[in-house]
Amino acid sequence: MDKDHEKLMLDLNRLMAAANLKTKEDYERFGKEMMGKTIPRFEKEALSKEEQAQDLVYQASESEDLFQADKMVFKALQLDPDCVEAYEFMGDQALSPLQSLLFFKLGFTAARKKLGEKFVKENKGHFWGLHETRPYMRCLKSYAECLYMLDQKDDALNTYFELLELNPNDNQGNRDYASLYCLELNKFIKYQSLHKQYNDDATAFHHFNYALFQFISKGDCEESRTALAEARSVNNHVLQLMLSKKELPELPATFGFGDKNEAIFYCTFAKDVWQNKKGAIEWLSLVYNKR
């Protein structure tokens, strides 16, 4: 979800809060009243300091002037020292994974403080579906990514599992990384549990991870080749990129199931894992050359 859409959802939630909706009938009436209407933008005077801080960060994210963006984010933190979006912004703009890690940790810590432990406990399993949880989930996911880059891979994997516990529906795709890193770290029982939980996935991540698992477990055999054949039917671009000596293209902003961008996305994260599993790349080459 881009920042414009995120801001729109934020304003919608503010409007719903102002309407003091309590019953199913209230929500249905509100929906009918808003049908075909533009969601209004709230004037600064109508917003709390916390909400003004959020809006400043959204403005900063749209600015092409980094100096002005920094000034807006600084002002946001003056208004609300626990502004989660401000820490998220600084984590995204930081110059090193360590700096990013620290900002994202400040972000999800502030978010958890705002939500409250009672809220977290009562809504565990339904996060992301609740708009107010999304800054927390974004910071926590980015924190996991930084941990992995800093070679704290066990901690990163545990964080991905925490994200999946908060939101099993997994709108962020955390299961992709969790399953891959389970294989990298030889945590095969955890991998199998994830594979079973999300068995209906039709992604390159899901199918090629399973092919790798079968090869690690059983070597070159009918089961592993069947798994690889199924993965290739899902995305036939992956093997060529896996076996290429060229540098991978830049990580795409978007991709579709089965297209080359999806293959680039998978290989960006998975190629090193495959290369570090003894015989895995050689097996891919053997199967690919006999296609």
Image (spheres, helix red, strand yellow):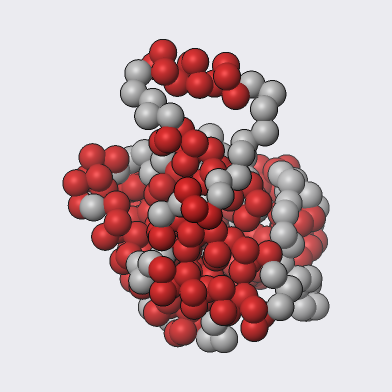
Q: For the point 49% across and 74% down, which residue is it?
A: 75
Picture coordinates of residue 182 (x, y %)? 41, 61
Q: In this orientation, which residue lies closer to the viewer: 18 or 29?
A: 18
**How many discs appear?**
0
Q: In the drawing, does residue 227 fall left or right of residue 18?
A: right
Residue 291 or 75: which is nearer the viewer? Answer: 75
Q: Residue furthest left?
A: 118
At x 46% / y 84%, what residue is drawn?
Answer: 99
Which residue occupies 73% across, 73% down?
64
Residue placed at 23% from the left, 40% from the top? Answer: 122
Q: Residue furthest front?
A: 45
Q: Is residue 34 above or below residue 270?
A: above
| Percent coordinates x, y for residue 214 in the rendering | 51, 53
Residue 81: x, y in percent?
36, 71
* Res. 11 visible in picture: yes
Residue nearer the viewer, 285 or 236: 236
Specify whether residue 169 is in view. Answer: no
